[in-house]
Structure formats: structure tokens, C-alpha cells
Amino acid sequence: MIARAIRKAGPVIAALGVSAPAAADTLSFYGTPGLVDMPNAYMLSDGEIALTTAGFGDTLRNTLTFQITPRLQGVFRYAFIKGFNTNGEDRYDRSFDLSYQISRETAHWPAISVGLRDFGGTGVYSSEYLVATKAITPQVTVTGGLGWGRLAGRNAFSSPLGAISDRFETRPDAAEGGISTTGQVDFGAWFRGDVAPFAGVSWAVNDKLTLVAEYSPDLYTKEQQRGAAPVASPLNFGAQYAFDNGVTLGAYALQGRDVGLSLSYVFDPAKPPVPGGSGSAPPALVARDSIEPASTRNLSAALSAQGLTLENLEITGKTARIRVVSTRFLASAQALGRSARVLANRLDPSVERFEITFITYGLPVSTVTLNRSDLEELEFSPDNSWQMLSRSRISDAAATDRGGELANLYPAADIGWGTYFTPSLFDPQNPLRFETGIKLTGFYAPRPRMIISGEVRQPIYSTIDESTRQSDSVLPRVRSEAIQYFASERAKITYLTGEYFARPQEDVFARVSVGYLEQMFGGVSAEVLWYPVNSRLALGAEVNYARQRDFDGGFGFQDYGVWTGHASAYYDFSNGFYGQVDAGRYLAGDWGATVSLDRAFNNGVRVGAFFTLTDVSFEEFGEGSFDKGIRVSIPITWLNGQPSQRRVGQEIRPVQRDGGARLAVRNRLYETTSGLRGAELADSWGLFWR
Amino acid sequence: MRWASVIIVGLLLASCSALPGVTPGAGPAVGNLASQGKPVLQVGILSKKTGTLVALDTVRGPFETWVSADGASITMRDGMMVATRGLGGDMLGSDIDESRAAITRRSPGRVTRFHTFLDGENRAQRRAYICDIADRGPRDVPFGAVSVPAQLIAEDCASQDQAFLNLYWLDQSGRIVQSRQWAGEFAGILTFRIVP
């Protein structure tokens, strides 16, 4: 009741940690800090995510803005422009922006930012700007800037950069190479050609209402060439109203002829609706001298009540060793704290030391050794998190023997069903296609670390199969015919594999997978990972032979087969950023490397970006020029406060082509083990006592 | 409606709106505990003007842990809150020894207390507070038809960025029979009342 009532006290959306936007934190039609259509020099707060949808006239822009670092902002935008294409069709345009705050605002100095808009997309919004913003009173800010590219419309003049080099005086035509070259990072054009000034002012009438006015040099030339009405006035006006829950609604008069509306939502991933969640309390420690030692069966049941499956139990002298699988808590530190308290409340009072090993797929990953008397001493003490961490030892758990294994655990099997929803994004005819249906999943584990598992899907409703998109790829069509895998209405095998996991030696993990590895490929996959328990660096290698599966999702294969594999390096920068480099051979037989960078919050929210460059040329690759994308993943527990290991999220690729495509084998070792390694345990250690 | 389907940001959050907001009643049912003769305590949530009963679940040394029907727990020492679990933004631990000594002795003065709260990134955040303890004189606390004579002690605390006022009503034996205590920025102020 208490937890529930408190949770209701802050409606989820209000508790999303929204710092009531300070007066000047208005978002523009491009979804970034700005006025109406013009940017200003401000940033969001570090880590914040802004979702904006804004429309006027024939344009609708949907933008996700992420404050990557306090000064660096990344943007993904998906815009719809009615009738924009030369054949009169509507344009769906994907674009990425980056902006960087060169100087922060001080009492006498403005904030100054530089921005690259649509630097790698199809070029509609391609522009750069340099902008300064200064608050002249706490309520009023003024903004002035210079724009290149699209922004160099009205009153444009020769670039002052021309003084440095003649090449800055003219801007190469972005559309020169046609659709095939779009998606290249077009740094050849940045800050080149004429410039035009822009300016604006914002006035925070009160905490809720902000009025904005701007002078925009953007003539919407490309839109006009395709039939839009000319811009009647360079002056745009708007009013934005910020609700308490982080939602802001804006209304605008633009270009002297249009009205527009915007809706935005800003939240901070570091502030979940319920910090630490509102799941049940852990069992409080009971007085040790009152404990009657529990049977193994009772201990197992007590652990099970905390989402922990007991697989092994050995008690020798004063030491108890257990192996558990954590199935409920996202953070292993929380599962550890629960395990420790269950042991402390159930084991013979003479047992003093607990060695708790987390296993996954039967694979022992990490062991945490702690003292029962430390638990008793620190349970409610003021510095209990740090002290408990400093008194615990996190070590590698390499031994894969079956000592102390509970009877009747193996062979193990389970079967279950559920529903699925597979989106297919950015089809030019319909940007959101999907298939939904029911799935049946099951596994059989004859002994630890050996798992046979599979999933069968029966589509019920699909719009993916309506797509008429034809692959024009000149490469082996390893991904570009993906929609054909959705053509059949019959049940299909999404995966059916035998997997074997091993710990060949300390700090080393291994995996072999055989079978239908993913929806489009089957074959054999072998992987090793070197990952010391407290290391920030992990190194892996994977070799696969993959053969393309039949489109109907049955047992058959097509003719195409390929040896593919990567050497991978994973690095935890320990400031919330995680980097990964995978170098090797991709499904189309191309050689290259993928670079990924993710910002991961301790509470599990992740936002990242990746790109792949291979020896496939930009022309051969086709639209988009090379593979790239962003990804967002949010744990369910972040959203509703209830313990769960499930996530929602999406990887967004502007286009999926055949170059730089990697095999999607399940249970790669780093993702399987990293949550249980030392860094992740320590990062969320505040949950040990939760 | 292609326009609608363009809203891909909606896609990212689409699965969120459909999430279950259920609370599994993992905690022991209070009714059971009460019927087993376990002591219960009335707890109110000031910001919501709602209340519930919590039942004494575990006693270890001076620490009494009380649990609610939905599985949250509050640990008290001599009627003063030392920790919470499951309220959100929980008080993981605390050092309230100085406050406790001054309040139970009803001796006004300045003391220091320490709280550690769980933040949204699973980190423990420690706060130190300077508190002024004052005796606000006798007050009668009504318990149904009878009213119990009590002394009201106020504890006015502030740290660099937080401030709160705790109130304790002590009966003549020095036991806290009623109180309002701050449980952190997220949970806010809780009120407690013994059930005689």
C-alpha cells in the first residue's frame, strides 16, 4: 500500500525526472534547443532525451535529441515532406545532426555553439551554423547566428571564411551524385558557400509560458521548387507552454502564411519514475541465534521467492558456496544482496562466509565472497553500500564442475508461448510496417551449459508482406531481401539451435552454436572471449559458417554460404560510455569494421550509435553509402518500477543494405556475461541493500 | 494514416504505455500478521493523505522492521525511522544516534544526523544534516475515546540542499506514540502512530 500510494503520488510522467525546463530551454521545429525554426546555442541537461514532433504546412518532423555529453548533442530526425519527391511522391527523410557548445554562457559572455544539421542523410536539411545566445535578463534571451547551406537563403553574402581559402566560397551541390551518394558523411561541403545571418529572442512570461520570435533566412527553396508556396515573411513567432510533466506544447505562426504545432517531451534517463524501483523489500535479517538451519529444499524455495534459482550448494566448515541463476533483477548487485540475506536467514549460525556464484546458461561467471557478520553489522548503517562493497571480494568463477549440484535439475526443459511484434521501418511507401503474431519458445538442457532451444512464430497480421520494395543490391543479398522472410503466412522457425558454453580457463569464456542461428541464416558459430572479472577491456573472436535460409522459414537453405567472423574489443570507459570495435568479414563477404559507442546509465537505459565501413564502395553499397544506425534500450523496470530483466528498445538504421551486415547469432558471450562481471556489479552496488 | 505512422518516436514508447502497473503482493499480508498477534503501526503518507497499516515483521537487536501489504518495509529504532526498502528513493541506511539520544531524553539542542539514499542511477547518496531539537511542550494525543498525554519534540533539519521537519510525540514513559518523519525526497513525509 505504501509503495503503491507513493508511486501514485507522482504520476509516472511527472516523475520522469523532468527538470521543469528553464525559461530558455525551448525546442525548435528541428527538435533541438532553439526558437521556431532557428537553433540557439543552448544544450539540454547532460544525458537528457527530447522527443519532438512538429508540423506546419507540408512538413512534419519527428526528432530524437540526446545530450551525449554536457556539450555534445546528437540528433536523429525522421521528417515527412508532402509531395517533395521529384515524381510528386511524399518524401520520408532521415537525418542526423550533431552540435557542440564551444563556450558556456557566463555573466558577460554568451553561450556559443556550432552545429551540423543533416550531415549524413539525404541532404534536404543539410546546413551548418554558428550561433550565440545570451540571457539579458532572467526572462529574456537573445540569439544571433550565421547559417550555411540551407540557412544561407535570404540576405546571403559571401562567406567570411573565403578569406582563409577560396574553397569556402562555393558549396558543392549535395545532390550531384544522386541518391546513391546520399548518406556519405559529406564533410566536403561543410561550412562552404554563402552565409546568412539569423536572429531571435525568447521571453519567458512565467514558468510555463515562453514567447519566441525570430528572423529566419531559410527560404525553403527546395520545397518551393517542388511546388510549395513561397515564404512570405522571414519572421516567425511562437508560444510554448510547458506542462509540469515534461510535455511542452507549442503554437506558431511561420513564414507569414502558415501555422504550426509542436509537441515535445524531455526526460532524464538518470531519473527513473521510481528511483531504485518499488518492488518488494528484501527479507530483513533475523537474529542469528534464532535461526533454525533450513533444508536445502527450503533454502531453494526462499531463494526462488527472490527470483534466484539455486543450482549448487556446498557447505564446508564455516563457508557456504552456492551457485544461482538470477531471473528477476536487472542489476546483479540487487540479486546478490537478496541471495546473501536469504543465506544469512537460513544457514546454520556457524556458517560465517558466503561464496555466491552467478551462473548463466550453466556457465559460472563471477563469485562474490562476503561475510555474514558484515551483513549483520551494515544492514542499516549509514555507509552500508560502500562498506559492503569494500568488504566483498569479486572474483572469476572459472571452475565448471558440478560439485554440490542439486538433484533433479538436469535434464531441464521448458516451453512457453507469447506474442511478438516485429517492426520494419522506413519503407518509402509506408515507414512503419510490422508483423505480429504468436510465438512458441522452448528449450531442453540435457546437462549444464548445453542447451537446445528454438522458437516458432505464427504470423497473424502483417503489413510487411505488402511491401513492394525490390532489392537493387549488387552485393549478395544477405539482408536486403529481408521482407521476403515475412512473405509466408505459415509458421516459421526463427531459430533452432544447439549451444554449448564453456570456461576453458580463468577469465575465458567459449561458445559453440549450431543450427538455424537466426531468421535468415543457419550454420555454425564458435566464439571465445577473454574477459578478466574486474577488467574494463574484453577481447573476443568469433568464426561462423553461415548459409542463407529459405524465405519460408522452414528447414531449407538457399545456395549462398559464407565464412564470416570478427575479432572484437569491448571497452568500458567507466564514465558511462562503452565502446566496441568488431573487425572482420561480414555476411556479404566484405571485410571491414564496426565501431559502436553507447552511453549506458547504471539503471540500464542505453543510447548508442554505430557505423560500419567495409571494402564495399559507397556506390556498390547503394542508398546510405555505408551501414550505420542508432539504438535505444530502456529496461521495463525503469518504466514501471517493478523488478524485471526485460527491455524495450529499437535499433534504428536509416536503411538496411547488404554491406557491413553481421550475423545475428544469439547469446554472444559479452552481452551474456557482462551484467554479472565486476564492473556492472560495482556500478549498481547501491542496490545491494535494496 | 501515414502521418500517424511516421511518428517513429511513438514506436519507441508504444510498448511503454501498455505496460502493466501491477504490484505483486509479494509481502506477507498484514491481515495475517495482525491476526497472528503481531503488532501493527499506522502509517500515513502526508503528500497523498492516505494511510495503511504495517505489521512488525522482524526484530533484530534494536531494529524493528515493519512491512506493508504490498511488500515495502520501514525499519525503526526506538520509534525513529532508520531505513526504508521499496518506497522508491529508499533510505538505505542512516546514523541517527545523536538525534535519538536527544529526542528520547527530550533535551533541546543541536545534533547531526546522516542519511544515505538510493538515487536513480543505483548509487548511494550520503547526506549530513544539522538538526535543531526543540521541546514544543505538552500535547494530548487522542487514541479513539481516550487521549494520551504526550510531549511534542520537534527536530528541524537542513543539509546543503535539503530540509525537513520531524515531529515526535512522546508519552510519559518516553515512548514515541506518534510521529511524522521525512523519508527522503521521493517518499516525502510519513506519519506513524502506534496501535494500542
Image (cartoon, coloured by chain):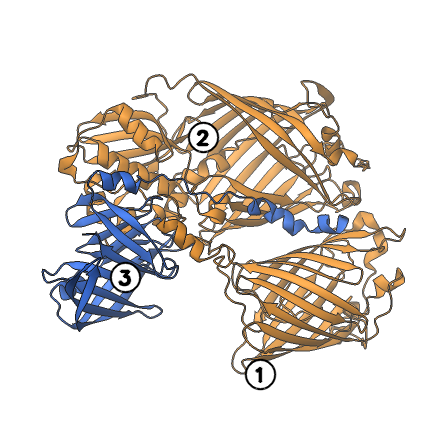
Q: Are dots 2 and 1 on a single chain? A: yes
> Is mark 3 in CB contact (under 8 Å) with mark 2?
no
Query: Which of the 4 image quarters holds residue A439?
Result: top right
Residue A136, numbered label: 1
Residue A642, numbered label: none
- State the image coordinates of residue A279 (x, y, percent, origin top left): 39, 44
A508 shown above or below A445? below
Residue A509, numbered label: 2
Q: How many numbered callouts?
A: 3
Viewed as shown, does residue A590 lie left or right of A636?
right
Q: Which chain is blue?
A: B
Query: Which of the 4 image quarters holds residue A312?
Result: top left
Q: CA distance from mark 1 to mark 3?
A: 43 Å
In the image, farthest residue toward the front = B145
> Mark 2: which amino acid?
Phe
Whether residue A382 is visible here, answered yes or no, is: no
> Mark 1: which amino acid?
Ile
Q: Nearer the viewer, mark 2 or mark 1?
A: 1
